Image: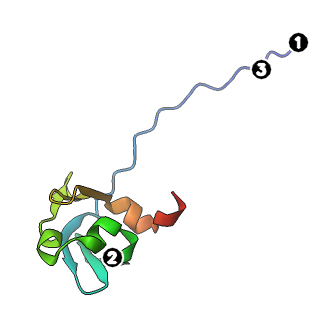
Amino acid sequence: MNTSTKPATTFRRAFVPTTALAQAVSFDEHMMHVALTDGRILSVPVVWFPLLAEATPEQRTEVEIGAGGLSLHWPAIDEDLVVANLLAGADWQST
């Protein structure tokens, strides 16, 4: 007779970064640069994001930094990015 019991589930709070928060976004010909509040600048190829790659320079500058720096949103092209995913190096082709 098996008398083992499953351990109680421990609830943990979700990790919310406090230093890797976006404060500004800029673009050059091939890259998107996200300035973080901790001083780092994260640069990723624009071609990773087809909607941004096809957007006009004016549309790219109309970015909204949301959730205290956790997310990026471009209303004109309906594009949303999560800063943590950019930091993790999420492979956009694998999804």
Residue type, numbered disc 2? Val
Give the vertical position of 71 relative to 40 (above or below).
above
Q: Secondary structure at mark 3?
A: loop
Query: Which of the two labelled residues, at mark 1 and mark 2, occupies the earlier sequence position?
Result: 1
Nearer to the camera, 24 or 6: 24
Q: Quadrant of residue 25?
A: bottom left
Q: How far separated are the C-alphas under marks 3 and 2?
A: 53 Å
Which x, y percent locates residue 62? 12, 66
**Residue at mark 3:** 4
Which colour style is shown?
A: rainbow
Which x, y percent locates residue 32? 28, 77
In the picture, the disc for residue 46 is 2
Q: Quadrant of residue 49?
A: bottom left
Residue type, numbered disc 3? Ser
Q: What is the residue that sits farthest to the front in this orientation?
A: 54
Mark whose residue sits in front, 3 or 2: 2
Q: Secondary structure at mark 2?
A: helix
Which x, y percent locates residue 72? 23, 60
Residue 66 visible, this orientation: yes
Q: Badge 3 local density, few (<14 within 10 Å), some, or many (20+)?
A: few
Nearer to the camera, 90 or 94: 94
Nearer to the camera, 36 or 80: 80
Give the vertical position of 15 relative to 54 (above or below).
above
In the picture, the disc for residue 18 is none
**Residue at mark 1:** 1
Residue 40 visible, this orientation: no
Which x, y percent locates residue 85? 40, 61
Query: From the viewer's perspective, is 46 left or right of 35?
Result: right
Query: From the viewer's perspective, is 9 left or right of 78?
Result: right
